[in-house]
Structure formats: C-alpha cells, structure tokens
Image (cartoon, coloured by chain):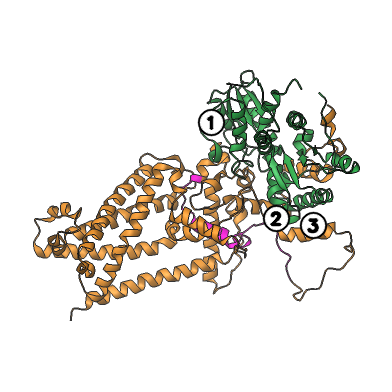
Chain colours: A orange, B green
Amino acid sequence: MNYLPNILFAIALVIGIGYFVRNVQKLIRNIKLGKDVDVSDNKSQRLKNMINIALGQSKMVRRPIAGFLHVIVYVGFVIINIEVLEIIIDGLFGTHRIFSGIGNLYGVLIGSFEILAVLVLISVVVFWARRNIIKIKRFWNSEMTSWPKNDANYILYFEMVLMSLFLIMNATDTSFQTMDSGNIISQYIAPWFSGLSENSLHLLERTAWWIHILGILVFLNYLYFSKHLHILLAFPNTYYASTKPKGQLDNLESVTKEVMLMMDPNADPFAAPQETDTDEEVPEKFGASDVTDLNWTQLLSAYTCTECGRCTSSCPANLTGKKLSPRKIMMDTRDRLEEVGKNIDANKGEFNNDGKQLLGDYITKEELWACTTCNACVEECPVSISPLSIIMDMRRYLVMEESAAPTELNNMMTNIENNGAPWPYNQMDRLNWKDE
Amino acid sequence: MNLKVPTMAECIAEGRQPEILFWVGSAGSYDDRAKKITKAFVKLLNTANIDFAVLGTEESCTGDAAKRAGNEFLFQMQAVTNIEILNAYEVKKIVTACPHSFNTLKNEYPSLGGNYEVFHHTQYLHQLIKDGRLKITTNPFKDKRITFHDPCYLGRANEVYEAPRELLKELGVELVEMKRNKRTALCCGAGGAQMFKEPERGDKDVNVLRTEDALQTNAEVIATGCPYCNTMMTDGVKFKEKETDVKVLDVAELLAADNQDL
C-alpha cells in the first residue's frame, strides 16, 4: 500500500548512480584517447605518493590556511558520507535510522557527523569569502570567468545546502531528538521549529531528508561536469604522476631510433625504407598539436585539475604579466578533450575532423614560448599535475613538425649544430679561458 | 694566476685516469662572466690538489637549451656525440658548475647510454670540505649579509637546496633567505632556452622581479650557482641601479676569494 516512497527512492537511486556510471565510462573512454605510456615502474613509490599527497593532503597544507580548511572539508565530506549508507537502507526498506539500534556508538557517530557538518559549513563559507569578498588574486585570473568561476561557487553552495539539510533533518526528527544521543548540534537547532505541529515537523523532516539524499545524487552527477572531479581523480593522478626528478624530460624514443641510425657507421645511407605490413602507416608525429598526441596520464591530469591556481600564482611568466598560465594549459586540454569526446559521441563512435586542435585554437604559441621550464607549477600542484610536460610536448611539435621556433631560438640551435655551443664561437676556442 | 687545467687527452697520453671530469659547459667556456666562475672553481680544485681533467675542445654543448626549445633531434645528436667521447675516456664521475649541464648529464643521458655519477660544483666542494681536502681559512665575506638564489635546475629540478647553503655557512656569512626560497624560489627567467630569446610581452622581466626579491633582503651579495642565473641577476641589479652596493657572485667565487693569495 505505502510502498510508493520506497519505489520512488529506488528509481532515484538507480537513475542517479546509473547516469554517473555512464559518465565515468565516457570519462575513461576520453582519457584512453591519449597515447599509451609505461607507468608500471616504481610501484611502491607511486603508492606512497598517492597515500601522502592524495589521501594525506601533504601538498595542500603547504599553504596553511587553505590547506587547513580543505582538510576539514575533505575529512568531513568523507566521514559524513557514512551516514549516506544509512539513508540508502532507510530509503529502500522504509526503515527509520536503521543503525540507531547499535546503541551508544550511534550517538557518537551522528554526534561527530554533526560537529563535522558545522565545521564544513564554516570552512565552506570562508572559502566562499576568499573567492568572492577577499578576491584572492589566483581566483580572478583571466581564465577564471564564466563557467570556471560559477562552477567553483556552485560547489560551495551545494556543500552549504547539503550540510544545512543534514542538520535540519536531524533537528526536526522528533524521535532522534527524544533519543537525546548524538544531537550535539541539532539540539540547538530544534527549538527554532518548536512552534510547529508534530505533523508539519514530520513533513519538514521528510522534506529535508529527501532533498538531502537527492542533493547528494545530483552532486554526484555534477562531478563529471565540474572541476570537483578532483575528489576522485586526485587518487589515480598522484599514483600515475612522474616519479623521476622534476628536471628530467623524457627522451623521445622515436627520435632516438633515427639518431642512432644516423650515428651508426655501418648503416647504409642508400638503403630503401623497410617494407612494413601496413603500407599506409603514417609516420609518428613528433610532439603534440592535439589532445590525442598527449599520453593518457596527461589527459587524466587535465580532468583532475581543480583550477586552484597555485601553479599560475607561482609561475614566473604569469607573475610578470605574460599570457602563459599553467592552469589554463590544463583547462584548455580538458575542454578540447571534452570537445573531441562529444564529437565522437555525436558521430557514432568515430571522430569527425572538426578542423580544430589544441594548438592554436586553445593554446597559443605565445603562451608556450613564455615558459621558463622552472617547474614551479609542478612543485605547487597539490595533486601532482605537470602542465610543463604538455607545454614541452607542444614545443616539440612546433619545432620538429613546423619549424616554428622564434628566430632567436633558431639561431641558437644553428649555433649548437655548427659550433657545439649556443653562441657563434669556434669549438676550437673552447679551452681559451684557461690562458686568458 | 697559473691554473693547472689538464685535458682528458693529455691524461690518457700520460697513461692515467683522472679522479673526476670537470664539465665546463658552453657558458663556462665562452661567456666572459661565466669564465670567471670556471676559473674560480679550477683554482679551488688546484688548491685541493684534485686530480681532474676537462674535455677541452672535445666538449660540446649538452643540448639542454635545444631540448627545452623543443628540438629533441638536436638534443639527442649532441647527447650521443658527447656520450661517445665520455665513454671512450671511461669517465665515471663528472662535476659541473652549470645546473643545466648537471641536470642533463645526470638525468637525461642515462637512457641514451651515458651513465655517470654527476655532481654540481657546490655538492662537490661541500664534500671536499667535509673530507678535509679543501680548507677555508680567512675570508673577506665573513659576517657579510648574503642571500642565495636557488637555480631551478639545481633546486626544484634535482632537490639540491642545502649544499650551496652549507658552503655559505662554512664561510661564516650571515645567510638571509628571500621570501621565495628553496622549492618556492622564483626562476631568474633564463631557463627553458629563454636565455637565448627576447621574453614574451608582459609588464616586467622575470629577472627584475627576482632581483627585487633579492634586494628586499638588504644583502650585499646575491650568491648563486648557475652561470645563467648569474647573468640574469647581474642584469637585474644593473636595471635597479644597485651595482655599486650589491654584487652577484657564484658560490665558488666566494670560496675562491679565501684562497686569493695562492
């Protein structure tokens, strides 16, 4: 007879989780558009990095205020979600606070959730103020307009509403208040509603309960469209990030093959190219002009970026007014990847050339050439993203595929080729300093 | 000043293998300011009686600037050529006064067949002092206010922050840190091949911003450990018209000043 709420709940749950899973699959598909890269090395170091940096938030707290507040929201969010388990069981089976039978522990749990909810609420309000009232510079760079700016605020509003609903739901739950265990915070909110009849109180409790759980499902599905995806992707991203010294750039293997052949005195300079099975095999492109030329860990990073701007706020080029912003490099990569993904969806699984690419349509040469490769952005990123690796891959494309380096750099490279030094000096003069 | 600078070719002709190879680098070989750093370092090596050698005219650019400009071909050609020579001389240990050479030799040569133990000169000098092979007696920089600018390719790139500072402490200087130091240090603006091109349009040059960081410390000397940083900071100090009050010196030059009478 009265199974309607249970059925509605089950439907909401299936739709909420189903749509999320569908988008996660799309996300994985998009990330796999990147080139393969070997990340099977240093497993224990990678695990350690993930535990320290993602789980342990070690790089977040380098900026103490933001770091401290973030840890509260992070811990609060994870722990309060234990409550969601109870909500789901209650919703599906029509029970009420199914875990309350476990005795005192229940009070302790809900009590700590309530305290955390208040702390999260305070932190989120401070976060909002930092963005919108104090206007901290890194939240107001040129790439932080329209959607990125709104997205950040929406997340904060979501959290404010969810935390408030949780507290209201507890405060208006007469049986829970009568239990008088675990209502550490909500007992002070309950009196606000003391004028209400038992029926309206119950209605209010049900409403808060429903909006709370529906809100959580909506928020879950919001992730895919938002920078908030970092709460999930920070873990794989810190695991797959480079474990090499920051100064080490990879040596392109495709180039090594050709260089070794050039240096091999036994190589036949007139040899015909080897016949391959696939005659129309396209020679590998050097560097990257579009997202599909990047490797999948770089694409994963693009989705992981939470646009905090610590990279940009420490970038020497950006600090001196150049166009380059490492954060924008990541956002552009993500936006282009999304565009490619949608193109594939719209064309039955095949990418239909749209005449656009990451280089030029999103990231300009001016930005790429402004980088000093100083690694400040890599050092700062709290989730181990390397905007530098993308900048380098795009420079490689510019130089090796398009010969489009600035003139002075072409001169420098000609000097290295001819004289073995970036300046036009004779190699035979290399030791002259000794006698000067 | 009579410097002893044997080449690898001479050593092999005499039938001996030197203890360590000093990689001078292009800046250290040709740039007038950087040559002084090279000589200061050699003076210290001579003082400590280190059995070292240089490649001399057989040395060629490591390819760092080409690689960071995006020219992987040119980089690997340079690397393979250098590795062929280094391996022919059976070089095992390398010291260099240039963090760019240091990073490239240490991190990017191994996968192309060049495996060496590579030191930045501040690491090597610090080791020499710890081992008692190099002694600091009196020096003109004692109690002077000095700040250290971390070169990106020594600091963040390879996490060497302490060796140069330890050397400054050996000199008994008053070491003052800039507000951005060690892993948060600001670049001088020369890395990633920027040394060889005009900067992109902006409202300031990076070296000027970094020089402002340094000037805020009221230091008399900006010490560093990279020929490119040295050029950039020297230009920055000139831009700020502070060249009479503030000197830009390599850590090796500060140490060598102690051994001036030699």
Mark 3, residue position: A259
Is residue B46 visible in the rendered image? The answer is: yes
| Residue under the point 45% across and 68% down | A23
The kind of residue on which mark 2 rests is: Asn
- Indicate the chain on which mark 1 is placed: B
The residue carrying pointer 1 sits among few (fewer than 14), some (14 to 19) or many (20 or more) residues within 10 Å by Cα, namely some
Quarter of the image for residue A3 reads bottom left
Q: What mark, if any, has residue B177 been given in the picture? A: 1
Left or right: B227 in relation to A47: right
Give, as a single range, the part of the protein colored magenta: A281-310
Task: Single out the residue that lies furthest toward the front.
Answer: B132
**Residue nearest the observer in this picture, A350 or A93:** A93
The kind of residue on which mark 3 rests is: Val
Question: Is label 3 on the same chain as label 2?
Answer: yes
| Residue under the point 79% across and 47% down | B91
**Residue nearest the observer in this picture, A226 or A41:** A41
Residue B30 spot, x, y in % from top left: 79, 33
The kind of residue on which mark 1 rests is: Glu
Question: Earlier along the polypeptide chain: callout 3 or callout 2?
Answer: 2
Is B244 drawn above or below residue B223 in the view shown?
above
Question: Is label 3 on the same chain as label 1?
Answer: no
Left or right: B255 in relation to A111: right
Left or right: A255 in relation to A109: right
| Magenta-drawn stretch contains A290 | yes
Mark 2, residue position: A251
Pair 2/1: label in front: 1
